[in-house]
Image: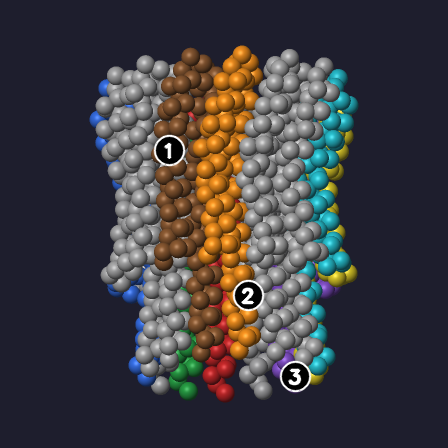
Chain colours: A red, B green, D blue, G brown, H orange, K cyan, M yellow, N purple
Amino acid sequence: MENMTELANAIIIAGKAIGAGLAMGLGAIGPGIGEGHVGGHAMEAIARQPELTNVIITRMILADAIAETTGIYSLVIAFLILFVL
Amino acid sequence: MENMTELANAIIIAGKAIGAGLAMGLGAIGPGIGEGHVGGHAMEAIARQPELTNVIITRMILADAIAETTGIYSLVIAFLILFVL
Amino acid sequence: MENMTELANAIIIAGKAIGAGLAMGLGAIGPGIGEGHVGGHAMEAIARQPELTNVIITRMILADAIAETTGIYSLVIAFLILFVL
Amino acid sequence: MENMTELANAIIIAGKAIGAGLAMGLGAIGPGIGEGHVGGHAMEAIARQPELTNVIITRMILADAIAETTGIYSLVIAFLILFVL
Amino acid sequence: MENMTELANAIIIAGKAIGAGLAMGLGAIGPGIGEGHVGGHAMEAIARQPELTNVIITRMILADAIAETTGIYSLVIAFLILFVL
Amino acid sequence: MENMTELANAIIIAGKAIGAGLAMGLGAIGPGIGEGHVGGHAMEAIARQPELTNVIITRMILADAIAETTGIYSLVIAFLILFVL
Amino acid sequence: MENMTELANAIIIAGKAIGAGLAMGLGAIGPGIGEGHVGGHAMEAIARQPELTNVIITRMILADAIAETTGIYSLVIAFLILFVL
Amino acid sequence: MENMTELANAIIIAGKAIGAGLAMGLGAIGPGIGEGHVGGHAMEAIARQPELTNVIITRMILADAIAETTGIYSLVIAFLILFVL
Amino acid sequence: MENMTELANAIIIAGKAIGAGLAMGLGAIGPGIGEGHVGGHAMEAIARQPELTNVIITRMILADAIAETTGIYSLVIAFLILFVL
Amino acid sequence: MENMTELANAIIIAGKAIGAGLAMGLGAIGPGIGEGHVGGHAMEAIARQPELTNVIITRMILADAIAETTGIYSLVIAFLILFVL
Amino acid sequence: MENMTELANAIIIAGKAIGAGLAMGLGAIGPGIGEGHVGGHAMEAIARQPELTNVIITRMILADAIAETTGIYSLVIAFLILFVL
Amino acid sequence: MENMTELANAIIIAGKAIGAGLAMGLGAIGPGIGEGHVGGHAMEAIARQPELTNVIITRMILADAIAETTGIYSLVIAFLILFVL
Amino acid sequence: MENMTELANAIIIAGKAIGAGLAMGLGAIGPGIGEGHVGGHAMEAIARQPELTNVIITRMILADAIAETTGIYSLVIAFLILFVL
Amino acid sequence: MENMTELANAIIIAGKAIGAGLAMGLGAIGPGIGEGHVGGHAMEAIARQPELTNVIITRMILADAIAETTGIYSLVIAFLILFVL
């Protein structure tokens, strides 16, 4: 029957949607809070050492880039769940 | 039967709606709190170093832009769940 | 049968309602707390540097506008779930 | 049959009620806490700078108005779920 | 059959009760904590500036009124779920 | 059949009980913590300014009355779920 | 059949038990923590101003009585769920 | 049939057990933490004002008695669920 | 049939086990944390006032005994669920 | 049939396992954290008053013994669920 | 039939696995955090009183041994669930 | 039948998607927050010891690399769930 | 039938996988946070007393070894769930 | 029938995927936060004692290695769930 095929297809798509939603939704919590922590301390650091603004900001970007990695992993996994699985 | 097709379609749409809702809803928590942390410290920094206002604000925007990224990833995944999957 | 169509339609509407509710409800937590953090520090900053009130408030609005973005993304996704999906 | 129509209608109404409840209930947490944070710091600010009361309060209202936005979005989405979907 | 109508009616009422319960129950957390925060800081402010009691209290009421709004939205949504939906 | 009517009635009562339980149970968390916060700071304020006891207590009652409102809304909604719905 | 009536009755009692359990169990968290906060600060206040013990304790009882209200509401709702619904 | 009566009875007992478990289990969290808070501050107060030990302890018992009330309400509700419902 | 009786019995025992597990498991969290708070502050108090060790410890036991009560209530309810219900 | 008896037995064992798991697992959280709090403050107290080491440690054991009680209750309830129920 | 026996056996093993997993998994949270708290304060204590290292460490082991108890209870219960039940 | 095969396949894919989503989504929370903590303290350290910028940043990268490991494990497990299982 | 045997086997393996996952996943949270707490304070202690590095580190390893125990218990239980049960 | 075998196989794979996802996802939270705590304090320690950089970093790696262990256990259990069970 064609119908069972459609039902199976519906379960696949619904499962993928929820799986990718969990991967990216949960995966955005950590980096978002972490980068906000880095950024907040960088603002304070600039206020204390204005002449170091460029030094601090370039390092902040580096620190953020590292904290971003798990967010990017989540993005990759969500993509893979949606389009490669 | 036409009916089974409609039921399968209903499961797909309901699954997509919940998946995209989780992706964007959870994904907005981290960046929202993180950017608030950056912004709050930037306010303090301006109060301590008023002559650095522009320096601090441009860096705050940069720090926020980085913290925003996982929120944007969530938006992208939610879009993909809704319209491309 | 007409009935199965109605049942499928009911599942779609219920799924959309819960998905949009999760997207907007969860998505309002982060920006709400984050903007409150920015606003609270801005109040403190004004109390310390009253002559900077306009400088601080315009920057606070800027910082809030950035923290608001993920809330707006949630709004957009909730709209799309409700009316475009 | 008339009955299946009624069952489908019941699922729609129950789904809408729970979806709107989640949207508004969760959506009231963030702005409520955030505005309380702004208001608490405004009280402190008035105690430190009584002559700035009007300046602080008008800015507090502005900061609260911004923090309120995601609560209003939640209200809008809950309305749409209930009456437009 | 009359019975199916009653079953459908039961699902509607149970769904409405749980939806309204979530809307108001969750919606009371944020404003309750937020207003407590405002009130606590107002008590401190009075202890530091007793001659400002009226100024602080009137502003506290204003701040609380704003923090109350999302609680009122929750009340409105719960009413609408119960009696208008 | 009489039985189906009873089953429908049972679902209504169970749904109402759980809905009202959620509304009042969750709705008591926020005001309880908030009023405790107000009261705790009022105790401190009295210890610092004993001659202001009446001023502080009357304002504390006012602040508590406002923080109580969402608890009262929860009570109202729970009553409505139980006896009017 | 007598049996269906018993099954319906069982669902009613189980639903009421869980609803009342949620109402009172969750409803005891807020006032318990809040009153502990008031009491803890009252202990501190007595240690700082021993001659004010009676003033502080009578006010603490007043503050606790107010924080207790939502716990009493929860008790009332739990009673109503159990015996009046 | 006798069997259905037994099944209905089983649902009643299981529902009562879980309802009473939630009522007492959740209801013990708030007072436990709250009374610990009162007690901890009372220990500190004694260390600072050893000559006030009796004054502080009698007031601590009073404060604890008030914080205990919601725990007692939970006990009452759990009893009622188990033996009166 | 004998079998249905056994099934009903199984549901009763499983329900009782889970209900008693929730009652005692959740009910041990509050007193455990609260008594740890009392004990921790008592250690500090002894370090500051070694000559008061006996005074502090006897009062600590009193404070702990009060904080223990809700844990004992949970034990009682768990016993009643298991053996009296 | 023998089979139904086995199924009923399986439900009993599975229910007991989950109930005892919840009782002991949740019940270990509070005492574990609480005793860690006591122990941490005892370490500090020894560092400040090394000559009181024995006094502090014997009292710490007493304080821990009291905080342990709810953990022991959980153990007892878990045993009773497993072997006496 | 042999099959029903196997199904009943499968339910028993799955229920035991989840029950033991909850018992040990949840039961490791409290002691882990608590012992970390003890250990962290012991490190500080050594840094302040290096000549007391042995005194502090032996007491730390004692404090940890007590905090470990609920973890050991969890281990015992998990073993009993797996192999004795 | 071909259909059952498709249904089994659908369950596999949905299960894999949710499993991988949980692995990566939850697994991104810890490293994200942890690396943000490292990065925030590194910003502060640079503001205090600007001449040590390179020393601090290279060590920060090392510390982040170690904190990243569990995120990478999560990525590996998510990949294995998706493509090797 | 052979099929029922396979289904029973599938339930066993799925139940074991989820049980072991909960045991090890939850069981890694406490020791991970606790050991991080110990390690963080050890870093501080070295910075304050560099000449005590070896003393502090050997004690840190001891403190960590104790905090590790519940993690090892979780590992043991997870192994037993997977291969001995 | 071949189909039942496939269904059983699907349940096994879905169960393994979710179990391994929980093991690794939850298991990455503790070490990630813990190692971030160690690393953050190491950054501070370097800023205070720059000449001790190598001493601190080598000990940080040691502390991290210990905190990593439960993450590695989670990895091992996830692997075993996926490929050995």
Q: Mark 1 points at which residue?
A: G65
Q: Residue at x 55, y 70 (%)?
A: H6
Q: Mark 3 points at which residue?
A: N2
SS for callout 1: helix
**Label 3: chain?**
N
Disc number at residue B85?
A: none
Q: Residue N9, percent across and down?
A: 65, 74
D1, above or below N27, in the image: below
| Amino acid at pointer 1 | Ala
Q: How many labels does the image show?
A: 3
Q: In which quarter of the image is residue B32?
A: top left
In three-dimensional space, the C-alpha distance between marks 2 and 3, rounded to whole angstroms, equals: 39 Å
SS for callout 2: helix
SS for callout 3: helix
Which of the pair B38/M10 is nearer the observer? Answer: M10
**Are labels 2 and 3 on one chain?**
no
K56, above or below N62, in the image: above
In three-dimensional space, the C-alpha distance between marks 1 and 3, rounded to whole angstroms, equals: 69 Å
Q: Quadrant of residue B34?
A: top left
| Amino acid at pointer 2 | Ala
**Are labels 2 and 1 on one chain?**
no
Badge nearest the viewer, 2 or 1: 2
Which of the pair K76/H58 is nearer the observer? Answer: H58
Q: Residue at x 47, y 70 (%)?
A: G7
Q: Quadrant of residue N45?
A: top right
Q: Residue A24, can we see it?
A: no
Q: Dot 1: few (<14), some (14–19), or many (≥20) neighbours within 10 Å?
A: some
| Amino acid at pointer 3 | Glu
Disc number at residue H10?
A: 2
